[in-house]
Structures are given as C-alpha cells and as structure tokens.
Image (spheres, helix red, strand yellow):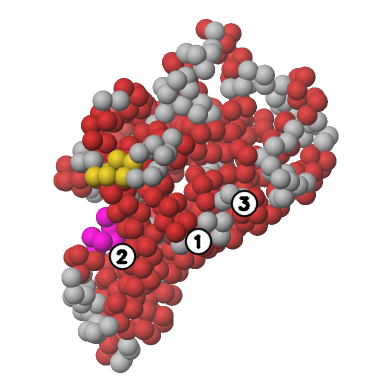
Amino acid sequence: MKKVQFKSNYSQYFFLAPQLLILLIFLYWPIIQTFKDAFTMQDAFGFGSQFAGFDNFLFIFSDPSYFTAFKFTIIYSFVITFITGSIGLLLAVQANKVMHGKSAYKTLLIWPYAIAPAVVGVMANYFFSERYGLLHHLFNNLWGFNWYENVFDAYIYVIIAGSWKQISANFIFFLAGLQAIQKTVIEASIIDCKSNIRRFWTITFPLLMPTTFFLIIINITYAFFDTFGIIDTTTIGAPGSETKTLVYKAYIDGFKGLDLGSAGAQSIMMMIIVLVITIFQFRYIEGKIHYN
Amino acid sequence: MTKYISSTINHFILSIGLLIMVVPIWIIFASSTHSSLFINTNGLQFFLGDNFIDNYSRVLFKQSGFFNEITALKMFLNSFVMATGIATLSVITSLMAAYGLVYFKVKYATFIFWLIFITLLVPLELRIMPSYIVMSKLNLVNTFAGLILPISASAIATFFFRQFYKSIPDELLEAAKLDGTNSWSFFIDFLIPLSKTMIAAVFIFMFVFGYNQYLWPLIMTTSEQYWTVVMGLKTMYGSISDRFAFVIMSMIPPVIIIIFLQKLFIQGIFQNK
C-alpha cells in the first residue's frame, strides 16, 4: 500500500465496516448456503435433508443435459468473443482514421452498449418471430429457417441476439486503446513500412494486446453471465435444452425444478471456471503481453 | 487520390456498422408508431405511422400486469429508485472501503483484501437461489432494500477506487499531515474532490448496471407494486404496438445517460488502466 499512512486504532475499521457488512450478509451468507446445498441431498417434498458428499456433483456429471449446457456455453462464448471482437476492432480502426464525423460515428456506435440484454432479447424476438420477423423471413427463404426444431438455427438466433450489443463494448475499448497509441510510433512506422495492412498487424495490433486480452475476458464473462436475459427472452433454451447456458440451466434446475442440491453443485462448478479464467488472466496473460 | 479512396472505404465500412447498430432500433421505433391492427396485417414497419401519441400515452398510463395494479410510469419510478439506490450505496461504501485499505495500516490487511476481492468471482447469477432464501429470511422480498442491497454487494467499484488512490502521489498525504489534517478531513477535503471524475464514472456505470437488472427483480418481486421496467418487458401484456412502445421507452434512460456522459465514462475507465 502507501508508504505514508495514517496510524489509528479504529478509524480504518469504521471505513471498511459498511462494505464488509453488506458483503457478509448479502454475499457470504448466500455463498455459504450454496456450499451447504451442494453437499446435501433434499428429498422431493422438502421434508428432510441429509449430507450427501459429492453425490450432487456425480449427478450433474452423469447428466447429459449438463454437458449439452457446457458445450453450448463454450461455443457461445467463443463465437461471441470472436464476432464482437473482430467487428468492434474493424469499426474502431476505421473510426480512428476518419477526419470528418468521428464523434457522430462514435456516439451512434456506442449507444447500444447501454441497452439491457433482456431488452435486446425482446427486440430479437420480434425480428425472429414467424409472424413479423424480417430475419426469420430472410433466413427462411435462404434455407428453411426453423429455430425451435433445428439446433443450428437456434444457435444463429441466440448468437445474433447476444453479439449485437456487445459489438459496442468492443468498439469503445478498442477505440480508446487505439487513441492511446502514441502518434510518434505510428509516424515512425509509416516511414519503415508502406503497406497499411502489414503495418496494422506488425505494429498496431501488438500494441493493442492489453486491450485485446482485457476484452476477451470481458466478452467471456458477458457470454457466461449477462446473456441470461437474452436466453430467457428468446429461445428459453429450446430446442430441448440445446441453447441453455450453464447459468440458465442452474437457474431452471434450482428455481423452477427446486433441486437445490444440483443447482448448488452447478454454481460451484461455475465458480471454479471463473476462478480458472481469472488465474489464467493474472498469471499467464499479464506476464506475456507487452505494455507500452 | 489514394487518400480519397481509402477515406471512402473507411466511411463505407463505418456506415455498414451504423446500419447494423441503428436500423434494428429504428424499425422497432417506426413500428411502435403504427396501430396493432396494421402491424398484425403488414409486419414490422420501416416508415413512421401516425399513432405515436396514442400508443405511448396509453402504455405510460394504462394499468397492466396480471392484476392490473401497475402502470409503466410506476415501473420507471421503481427502476429509478432501484438504480439510484444501487449506484449511491456502492459508490459510498466502495469509496470508504478503498480508503481504509490504502491509507491505513490494517491488521490482517491481506485477509480483508481477499475477503473483499474474492467476491468479484461470484456474480449474483451464481448465488441467485440461496440469495432469495436469505432475503426471505430477512423479510426483504418485495421491498426496495431487497432489490438494492444484494446488487450493491459488489467489489468492482472498490477495485477501481483502490487503483485510483494508489496513483495519487504520497506527497499529498505528507503535506496534509504536516498541516495537521486528520484522517476524516483528508478523506472529505482532499480525496473526494480529487476523485470527482472517478465517482461520476462509477456512479454512471452502477446506475446503468442497476437499471438493466433483469433476473434479480424477476425473482424478488412477487407484488406488482415493485416491478421494474426491464423485468416488466417480459411480463407486460398488451397489444403488439404497446409492447414496441414499451421496448423503446425502456431503453431511453440508460441510452441518454451513456450518450451525454460518454466522455466522462470512458475517462473514468481509462484513468485506471
């Protein structure tokens, strides 16, 4: 921390207390409850419960629908990260170059960032509805689109709905990253290398690495957690459970199915995944990328 | 000449981007100004109709919900109370906690640090069911406190403020100490004025975050009196053009905030990177 500090016996606890109190009641208590649930088995009528060891975990691992959700979540986060990252970067590079209308472009490209995922989902709903939907008609004319029976079509539906607003987030951060690169570096590179495209991949893109990795993490967390509102307002997991994310499945099993043990075990599995991503981010990426 | 061509290409690509981001919202908006009958027979519309005032005023003031107990206006009010509560509470508690961590010698500092920051790994979605049980034990279901408190239990703002405090030169505290400033007045008179931009940015961020909550209000509010805008979207019944109008209105507050305060917001984020 700081070299110069206040010496006091109690003031620091006064400053820390409000946050710690809120965290203990509204975060740690539920987390402890989650662990309790994960290791107990409740009978179907809620009359009694008993310690179950790892039974709930064994149950979810033997459940094929858990692996379907796992597979979908991985595919979903990978595709969303790739699509929104590349479109966001492409637009940011263009917006950084233009002389006229820069701030107009910026404003119009940024605003979908503020819209709630659930609202985006409701909008997507209209575009993919059989009755009104423009995209439904377009895809239907192309190959016979039917998202509630065809898994691939359902993927297209939730990927388009999930990517749309996240393009804005990627655009904002890439643009800010580009503007942080010093003019002199760019001017020097123009002298050395005439090709625009080669200069981008050899000079600009490596300098953007910190932003890129930051965004990868942001996009993965978005696809894991924030897409709940999108799934719940579009496919609701259909066809079957093919488009349920891990978070959505845990919610359905716990809240609708009232299987607290399974939901608790699923939550702990997700905490482990988040922990792995975070460690990976701190240890591996922070050490390897080049900051200017 | 090549400069001219390349700038045309830039504008062309950006225009396609604009089409992707703006046209969907425009279509929903244009459709919301037609009558339901017209939409049902002709599908989504690209051009404006003449039912704008009719549709929007009907949605704002009409009672809706299962028991017809709530208007859209009331939902907006609820959302504002919730979002403001979340933003205010997390800014105040995080400012204080970060101050305690950075400017004091704290016993078990590492332990407290981890106690606060490990919570970043457990978003609300991961503890939704037990959180609900805790809230019902505390009798906080169907209250604003129940909507606000679990969402303000976040260390993300503390993390931002801590980074910011660490970037402030030590000399400031040395000089203040020479003048005999105590820890309370250093916090109020020096740090808070210095953190103005950060505070504003965190406030905006948390406000939009709170306003956009969907799952938590859905679970926490069994009484229609506490419905919020974003969760009301799915549960609200009405004709198709009513729903279009409601979708458009629901995005206005956060979008206005981001558009007008984007500079502040981006500045706040990047002060820390």
Q: Residue furthest bottom?
A: B180
Residue B107 is left or right of residue A229, and the answer is left
Q: Main secondary structure of the magenta part?
A: helix
Name which residue lies at 16% across and 46% down. A283
Residue B95 is left or right of residue A110, and the answer is left
Task: Pinpoint residue A190: horizontal percent, then vertical percent.
Answer: 30, 36
Magenta includes B117?
Answer: yes
Residue A236 drawn above or below residue A272: above
| Label 3 CA crowd tier, 10 Å (few <14, some 14–19, many 20+) | few
**Span colored in magenta:** B113-118
Residue at mark 1: B139
Residue at mark 2: B162
Q: Are marks 2 and 1 on the same chain?
A: yes
Task: Pinpoint residue A228: horizontal percent, then vertical percent.
Answer: 46, 37
Residue B84 occupies quadrant:
bottom right
Magenta includes A262?
Answer: no
N-terminal label among 3 and 1: 1
Looking at the rendered structure, the kind of residue marked 3 is: Ser
| Residue A244 marker | none
Name which residue lies at 47% across and 56% down. B136
Which residue is more in the foreground, A3 or B36?
B36
Q: From the image, which quarter does the N terminus of chain A lie in?
A: bottom left
State which chain disc 2 sits on.
B
Frontmost of labels 2 and 1 is: 1
Looking at the rendered structure, the kind of residue marked 1 is: Asn
Task: Pinpoint residue A163: horizontal percent, then vertical percent.
Answer: 46, 31
- Per the model, the C-alpha gap separating discs 3 and 2 is 39 Å
Task: Pinpoint residue A258: horizontal percent, then vertical percent.
Answer: 42, 39
Residue A8 drawn above or below residue A149: below
